[in-house]
Structure formats: structure tokens, C-alpha cells
Image (spheres, helix red, strand yellow):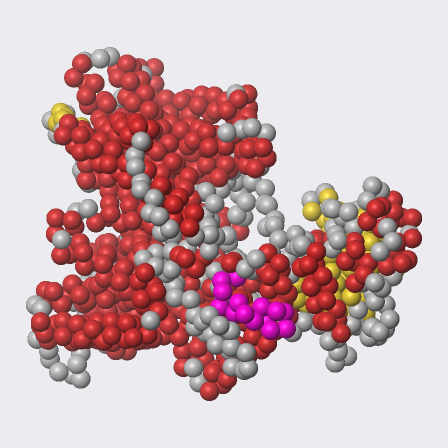
Amino acid sequence: MARRTMRLNGRDIGSALLTALWFAFLALPFLAVKINPVEQTVTWRWHAIIYVALAAFLLSLGGSLYRQYRKAHLARKSQNDLSSEQSLFGRLWATRKIRLSLLAALTAAAITFPLLFSTYQTNIMITALIYVMLGLGLNIVVGVAGLLDLGYVAFYAVGAYSYALLNLHFGIGFWSALPISALLAAFFGVILGFPVLRLRGDYLAIVTLGFGEIIRLILENWNAFSKGPSGIANIPRPGFFGLDLTLEGAIIYLYYLMLGLVLFTVFVVNRLQNSRIGRAWFALREDEIACQAMGIDKTRTKLTAFALGATWAGMAGVIFAAKTTFVNPASFTFLESAIILCIVVLGGMGSIIGVVLAALLLILLPEYLRPLADYRMLAFGAVLVAMMVFRPQGLVSRVRRTYVPAGKNIPDE
Amino acid sequence: MNRQEGQSTSDRPVLEVMNLTMDFGGIRALDGFCLRLRQGEIAALIGPNGAGKTTFFNCLTGMYLPTRGELQLFRPDGATRRLNGLRPDKITEQGLARTFQNIRLFPRMTVLENVMIGRHCRTRAGVLGAILRGPAARREEKDTVRISSRILEKIGLAGQLNEFAGNLPYGAQRRLEIARALATEPLILLLDEPAAGMNPQETRELDELICRLRDEGLTILLIEHDMKLVMSLSDHIFVMDYGRKIAEGTPAEVRRNPEVIKAYLGEEESFGPA
Amino acid sequence: MDYFIELFFSGLTRGSIYALIALGYTMVYGIIGLINFAHGEIYMIGAFTALAAATILSFFSLPLPALLFLSLAAAVIWASAYGYTIEKLAYRPLRHAPRLSPLISAIGMSIFLQNYVLLAQTPDFLPFPALIPEFAFLAPYAGVIGSSDLVILLTTAVIMALLSLFIKFTRTGKAMRATAQDRTMAMLVGISVNRVISATFVVGSALAAVGGLLIASHIGQINCFIGFIAGIKAFTAAVLGGIGSIPGAVLGGFILGLTESFATGYVSSDYEDVFAFSLLVLILIFRPAGLLGKAAPEKV
């Protein structure tokens, strides 16, 4: 088929100019004016407006080109062909050989990481791995079962505070706290989930957000219980068979521990997704009423997803507490939930490899591109919107599982 | 055209609906509706739009909670089950499976996965089974795949096993819904306008499929507007209007019934000689 | 007794603001079934624009009422412009997407706007000038009701009345009601649904901007995070009254404002936000249709 050339006509340019003007107008009171509260004066920053207008102009032109491209593209492929949404990466990933070699390379890089890089870098990597775990946990709830949980951070807090408090009051160590906190978080998941899971999707989102904030506010204000905003310090790092580790040793140890836990998480989540329960979750995301008509117990299936998701958050919380040796309520704000949600959405709902990549990308990128760090949350917000508008299936869409039925007639693919 | 002979309808009832009433606020959608299905028959529920046919399905399958009435299922083992107030999933477990008027497949799951969902209530594996994948869980999973693909073969979709359900043509989607319902091992299959939007060729195939299912011993109740299909297919017809049953009987009886003709005024031509 | 009345009026003042913001939620929800998570940010944008306008205008030594009206106009214009743009960029492309997609987009928009203002201006609190004049005749009751309380109450009442008239009698208002009832039908009878939805966002944003200016002037400071909490609370108010119902939003706003005022006054101020969140959770669980809303059975 001949490649159609794309060109911009006068109308495109005109509308781009209008867009530029409009955004310049929008930005006026915020970017052009800087209010100085002390002296009651303003500083004018006209150059900022020009940048905004320029960016809007170029983006608008880009948008026109993109629409033309889409039109040509869609003409070639039938519009509702869902399989065409598989990304290049997804297709590569589906090839066994490529997948195995990629995994091998990744494993090698992960294992040698703390030996090659400084403690500081290792520490950052631990944080990233914690987010991988959180992302995978939330992925069960949001990505797989389609329950938009905006209060996921509450379970993270439950995990972190259970370890901190259990250690403070009863001297319980990391290894005992890990399963206890996981169970506690799951328990909280069930308790919170039970009344709210019959709500419609968007109401569920808001109620979970409310729960998340309530838990944080309780931690902040109930001084006798949680020591309030000042938090709990001196939480021990995990012990290594009773040996006293140096700080550096402890961090490297924590890194490998976390790596192991992430692999464990991937293993478990993968098996869950490809099981009877996992299928029921996916189906629930697609159509609740049809699910019920097919004999799926809606509440129970949702609760399982909610509790299992919470379990990972609980474990991640324990590791977070052990890593920073300090917890306070400020670590568990709504923004944290939003970051984890962003990881799931960017990675691709229900795609394990996508979530892992997105977590590493979103956490490591701002760490290494320091000048960008300030713009982190701004970018997260933009990413959420852009993903929904342009690529709702995420970076890596879930690889469709294919079956070859045992028996005489094998369908040709 | 008439297939009355050579059928295996026994007189044993499988479903008894007594005095079913459903109110929505002030509107009475079902008004003392009664119905009895016999084992192995194809029954049709007809009536003008808004007569309460789909509402009846929704009450029967637990989607709506009826205001009054009695729903009883007679299982082949002789047990009697009251269906009133059971959740939809429990009713499916008891042996009633349905399709939907406006197709409700899981569009982003494959054809096979859609049918495998139907196996959910007949399988057991839980979270631990999924994670540990022990011999029992593995066997169950294998059986699920085997049984599901066999159903798809029967329904004529074996070639599209790994296709996304949303990508299937319309007629195939309707058939997939039936396949999915069959996977729940129902005693009674409830079809809500299975031929809606189908071309004559697809309708013929559907006709054959439904007869085949009946011959295998399934009891089928369908809502349908295609009178030719209803008249040729059904052993027994219930006619509804304004939430009540206004007539019932064999196709020939119903066709002659003056009440029915009145309710269908303006649609007589569909009752022409079949 | 004075304390009670003081709490009562402060509750009404809070309630008015919640009602003003809640109207935006409820109107948008009524028309496209979306929880416009970024609506709280629109309120914040309105307050910031008012601050910028007031600061600039204060160089011209205008009389206070002129300052108030010009700042209000600026707040309303820019907030409406933002509301319009957000709908067009983040929600319109998703009109036929699964239900959760526009909600996630809205959350993204909210985070984006919050951080946009944070980066463009400052994360700190900024003092907000008192734009509402002090009335001499209220001086004897200063401990009970301030002049800004009175202005807020009156403004809210007037706006509610105007909005009801607008919805009831104007062409756009009628088109809005028609679209809320049945979008497809509205489209078939020739209503430009896109324009109606845009109008809804513009009106809702304008109301939020009025609320933003009034409360900022009342409290005397703003920062870029005020939209989040105010948004959640106004949403609570909307749900409490029955989301989609305009009188419901007003009723919900007042109930929430009074509850908060009395709860913080008589119980504890530490848990101020917990009351609102708990109320939200409880309503959604036990009466998701709200006080004045109708429960719609799910269509099978």
C-alpha cells in the first residue's frame, strides 16, 4: 500500500495558533505573574507565557499530524480489532526466546547491582523495588479485578506501623513481623472491603480514598497509639542470623531480600492471574452482571482480590519501615496512592512485566534526572491523563494467553 | 416444519413459577405470573415489547428480587429447591443459566476463557491451589480447558478458541453466550432473544443448535420475537402481556387464541401459516 | 448560647462554600456521570487567580468593592476557562471509554493542576487580602457573625436562586436538563450535547471560583493544596444530598458544614477531616442515593 504523506494545511495552523493563544491566556495568572506575598508585589515573567504558547502551538500541530496518522492507520486495520492493540514490546515478549534472554539479562543486572554501585544507589534501588511490589499488589486490585482502590496506601501504612508498633511494644523482629503485618493488612482489606465492595466502581474509588485518609488522620492524631506526626523511630533493620551487619552490609542484605520478595511476588501474581480465581477477576472487570449470571460469587471474588492486594502492601510497608528505620504519617498520603496507581496505569492494567517496568521508570527516572525531580508529580498527573486518552492499555498490554486443547482437532492460529 | 413428533418431552416438571409479582415503585412489571416447564421441552415466552418477559428472566435468575411469588426447581435427583431470594450466582449453581438480550460477553477475554468462566461454579480451586498448583488444581484446570473446548466444538466455535470474544461477528457472539451458559452445566437454559439481529442463515443454525441441545435432555426457555422461529421450534408457548400470562399452549393452540391475536394486533401477519 | 450561635453561623458559612463547590460536582455528574475529581482544583485555581488579580489591582488604589468585583470577575473567567479546557482535553476523548478511565484521567488532572500551581507559584501558604468589607452595623455582633459570614451566606443564596432560574428557564438550562435525562435523545432532538457539557463545566467552575474567592478572603490565606480537601468535602456534600440533584447539593453542603462546625466545636478539632470522611463513607455505604436522590436500579 502506498504511504500516504501527511501534510498540514492552513486550518491546522490556524487552530494551532488559536490553541497557543488560549493556553497563553490560561497560563497568564499563574506563569506570567509571580506573587510575592511578603511585599505585596508581583514579578512579571512574560517569557514563560511565550514558552507555553510555543509548546501549545507545536503540540497542536503534532495533534493534527497524529490524527491524520490515526485515520490512515485505522483505514488499514479494522477499527474494533482488539488484537491490534498489542504493542511491539508485547509481541516481542510473547516470543519465548526473547523473553528468556531478556529475563536472564535482567536477573544478572539485578544480582550484580549492589556490587557494582554504591550504597546510595542500592538504597534507591530498594525503594524502586518496594514500589514494584506495591504496584504488583495494586495491580491485582485495579488492573486485574478492575476495582479502583484510591486508598491503597492505607494497607502500606498498616504494614509499616504494625512492624513499628510490634517492635516497639513487644520487641518483635523483622522476620516475625513480615507475615504478621501481611496478615494484618489482609485482615484490614477484608474489613474495609466488606462494606464497600458492593458499591459501584466510581463510588468505590471515593470510599477507598476516604478510608485511606481516615487511617492517615488517625495515625496523625492518636498520639497515644501511634506517637502522632512525629512518628516512630529506631526501627531495626532485618537481622542476618543474629549477625551484626554494618550499615552497608545491612543495605545490601535488604536489597537482596527485597529482590527475592519481588521475584516471589511476580511468581505468585503470575500464578494467580492464570488460575480459576484470576480468570474470575478479569471477568469481573469486564462485566459484573454477566459474571454473576455465570455463577461467580461477586463479593467473595472481590474480597479475595482486595485482601490479596492488601497483603503485598502490608509486606512492602514492613520493608519500608525497616529500610528507613522510621515511620510517620506523612509517608502515607493520598499522593502515594496516586503514584502507585500511576505505576499500574502506565504499566498496563493486568500486565506484570508492564508494572515492573513502570515502577522502575517512575521511581528511578526522577532520582537520576535530578532537575526533573521537582516536576515528578506534575509528570505523574500528566501521565495519568495522557495514558487514559492515548493508550489506556498501558505500555505493555497483557499478553493474551492461548491454549491448545488436548484432543484431535488443534485449531490453527 | 412442525417438529412436534419425535421429541422426548416427559411430563416431569423442572421449574414451577407461581404467582410471581414484581413492582418497580408504582409500576407492576409482573402480575401474578405462573409458569411450569417440563423436563426436556423447548418453551417460548412471547409477548409485545414491555410485556415483562425480560423482567421475568431477571426475577428468575436472581438479578431482581421479586415482590411476591414462588420459584421452585425440581432437580433430577428428586430434590426440590426454592429459588426465591437466592443470589444470581447461587441460582446458576442450582442449574439455571441464561444469556442476555444485549450480549454480555467478556470482550477482552478469549473465546475459550469466556467459556472457562462458565466452569467457575463447577470447579473448586482457591487461592492456595492457584499459587501452589498442586496435582488436584492442575487436573481441574486441565479438565476446565478440555470441557470448555469441547463445548465450543459443539457450538461451532472451535476454530476461534484464542480470539478475543469482542472480535467475533455478531452471530458468533450470540452462540458464544450460549456456550458460556452451557459450561455451567445447567438443567434449564434461558435464552433472551437469541435470534435478535441474526441473518436467516444464522437463525437456521441457531434453530438446529437449540433442537440439538433439547435432544440431549436440556430444558430450554426462550424469549423471542421471531415468530417463525418460535412457532417451528417450541413445544409449548407462553404469551405475556402487561405482566400477566394471557395464554399458553402448543404453537397451534396459541395461534388460534383470540386473546393473543388481540395483544398482537397489527402483527397478525407473523401468525400466518408457518 | 452565643457559642452555639457562633458555631451555627460558622457552619452555615462553611456549608455555603461546600454547596457552591458541590453544585459543580453534581451538575457534571448529572450530565456525564463522571466524578470530576479535578473540580476541587478549579476552586483552588479560582482562589489563586483572585489573589493575583487583587494583588495587581491593589497598585491602582481602587475602592474595596471595585477590587472585590474585578477579582471575582477574573476568578470566574479563568476558572471557567480551566474547567472548559479540562473537559475538552481530559474527559471528552474518553466519553465512550470504560467508566473508570475518565475517573483516572480526572485524578491525573487534579494532581497535575495542583503541582502546576505549586511549581508556578509556591507550595507555601500565601496571605489573602480581606476583599470583603467590614460592615459597621455588624460590629455589635462581631463575636457571633462576621461581615464575611453574612456576605458569603447572601451571595450563596443569590447564586442558588439565579442558578435555579437559569436551569429552569434558559435555553441552555433546559438543554442541560434534557441531556442529563437522556443524552442520546437530547442529541436526536438537535441539542448540541458537546456544547451543553461544556456549558455545564463552565457554570460549575464559575460557582467554584466564587466559593474560592469568598472562603479565601474569609480565612485570609491559601495554598495550592486547598482544592483537595475542599473538593472531597464538597463531593461528600453532593453525595449526601444525592448526587445529580441540585437542591440536594445545597442541602448536603449545609448539613456537612453544620456537622463539621458543631463536631469540631464541641468534640475535638483534631479530627475535623475525619468527620467529613466518615460521613462520606457512611452515606456511600448505607444510602448511596443520598437524601434527595433516587436509587436507580442497575439495568440488566
Furthest-front residue in view?
Answer: A2
Q: Nearer the viewer, residue A398 or B241?
A: A398
Q: In the image, what residue occupies the spot 40% across and 44% down?
A: A71
Does residue A60 appear left or right of residue C201 in this picture? left
Place residue B73 in its image quadrant.
Answer: bottom right
Does residue A123 appear left or right of residue A388 in this picture? left
Q: In the image, what residue occupies the spot 30% across and 34% down?
A: A8
Quarter of the N terminus of chain C within the rendering: top left
Does residue B87 appear left or right of residue B232 in this picture? left
Q: Is residue C60 magenta?
A: no
> Where does the magenta region start and end?
B152-165
The x and y percentages for residue C131 are 27, 21
Q: Nearer the viewer, residue A393 or C132?
A: A393
Q: In the image, what residue occupies the spot 67% across and 59% down?
A: B202
Place residue B96 in its image quadrant.
Answer: bottom right
The x and y percentages for residue C183 are 55, 36
Say if residue C134 shows up in the picture.
Answer: no
Instruction: Tell me if residue A181 comes above or below residue A338 in the rendering.
Output: below
Q: In the image, what residue occupies the spot 30% across and 70% down?
A: A315
Instruction: Tell me if residue A78 comes above or below residue A55 in the rendering.
Output: below
